[in-house]
Image (cartoon, grey):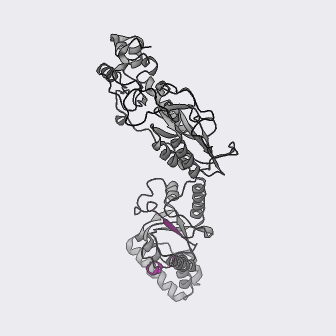
Amino acid sequence: PAGPGGVAVPRAGLKKWRLPPDYSGITIPEKPKLRFIDKVPAVPKVQREPRRLRDIRGPSQVATDFTQGQYGILALGGGYLHWGHFEMIRLTIGRSIDPKSMFAVWRVPAPYKSVTRKSLGHRMGGGKGPIDRYVTAVKSGRLVVEVGGRCEFGEVQPFLTRVAQKLPFPAVAVSRESLQEMRREEEQKRLDNQNPWTFERVVTSNMLGMRKYLSPYDLQLKGRYWGKFFLKHRV
Amino acid sequence: WLPALQLLRRGSKAVTRHWKAVPFPRQKLLALTEYLPPRPALPPRCLPRLAPRARQEDGYARVLRGQLEDTLRASRMVAVCHYNSMADEDVATLRHFLRRHDIHVKFVLNEVGLSLTGARGVPGVSPGFWGIPGVPGLSPGQQSLPTGLWNSVPIPSSRFAGACIDDTILSRQGVENFARLPSLEVSQGQTVAALSLLSSQTSSLLQRGPAHLTALLDEHIRRLRDTGGATEPPPGQSAGSR
């Protein structure tokens, strides 16, 4: 129905309009899409390297915070990313972002670690197998990709969660605010825990001789990690 | 070179693809050191709920409310109806019909009306004064409403809620009674006539004739003597009868 002045008056109620977000400080780099990642490094390794699975274990010390973008994929477990994963991420994100207003950035290096595999059907022995492929090690708590630009989390979250589900380790799409919220909640949980006995306390003071049944790495891991898995529910 | 400890020959390494079985002492330790959330003495659902924060009013809502206030202040008679969706052409027809009788139709949102009268609306009037969604307010002009108008207004799907005429809130019966009252000129004439009746009667009496007047006076004196009161023939009458 036309109200005063001939303007249509809404029937169900007034819509509350919120201000559009401020994108003043955002610059989109020249190449907004993710760069191509090689299957094999430029200088392939001659000597086969030992397995060194400790590069999967425990929390990550690098690439834990945002640098350029506002949204990203956070790894919640350890694992190896190989070229197939990189291509999947590159193509999915390249298809989903708008290069004029959004950009994406890699936060993991190209595959550098050689992984060997013995040919199928042979018995044990006969030396180490030849190099099968190259992989990148990812620890839990590390950002894999970052996305930024003139967009909101709601626009970016669908395709980031789709990419996160396809990764070999559990991962989740995060924004700066949601990551901060996650860290804050973790800290709050640690502070208001009513249990006087914590894993950390028991291990550091070796109560009941528990260190006989635990690994020396549990001093740093504090019961939150088991192998490559990150136990989110533990305090 | 053989490792000093032959422990690695059995089982798998520390980091595996699969979920390694957790040894029992470690399981016991993990169960012991679980997170216990804080438990307040009173659960929060037993505590009184915090007062809701004052909602920030929308600028547009404020403008609409100002317009409504101006309308109510400007017009002496306001009638409020419940509006349910009607066809657009019916709405236009109704507006034209009412405009011919100098009645302006304005559509008011529930939100805006409630913010003006408070959350519970106006007591005493049918519970829809501002409580039903999409209430239009009719603001008639300065003159009073013709009697037969409400019967002929074609509002099939609207319900009359109440009216505010000269700062008095009336229900449907009140408005009907108000409409049946005689118009202002008629009532003014009646009042003037009633007030001036006595003086007109007196003037006509004086113009009749002296014999009639003396007869009336004698009658008056006799009546007074009968009742036993003091007789005081008005001096003006006797002077006029000469």
Vertical placement of B238 versus A223: above or below?
Answer: below
Q: Position of residue B39 (x, y in %)?
A: 35, 27
> From this viewpoint, is residue B52 visible?
no
Q: Position of residue B184 (x, y in %)?
A: 54, 76
Q: Position of residue B182 (x, y in %)?
A: 49, 78
Depth check: A132 or B208 in front?
A: A132
Quarter of the figure that contains the C terminus of chain B: bottom right
Residue shown at 58% from the left, 54% from the top: A17
Q: Quadrant of residue B123?
A: bottom left
Stretch of the chain drawn in magenta: B129-155
Left or right: B138, with A122 as reference point: right
Vertical placement of A170 versus A224: above or below?
Answer: below
Depth check: B199 or A118 in front?
A: A118
Residue shown at 45% from the left, 58% from the top: B122
Q: Position of residue A64 (x, y in %)?
A: 56, 31
Q: Quadrant of residue B208?
A: bottom right
Vertical placement of A181 versus A90: above or below?
Answer: above
Left or right: B102, with A54 as reference point: right
Q: Main secondary structure of the magenta part?
A: loop
Left or right: B165, with A7 as reference point: left
Depth check: B54 or B23 in front?
A: B23
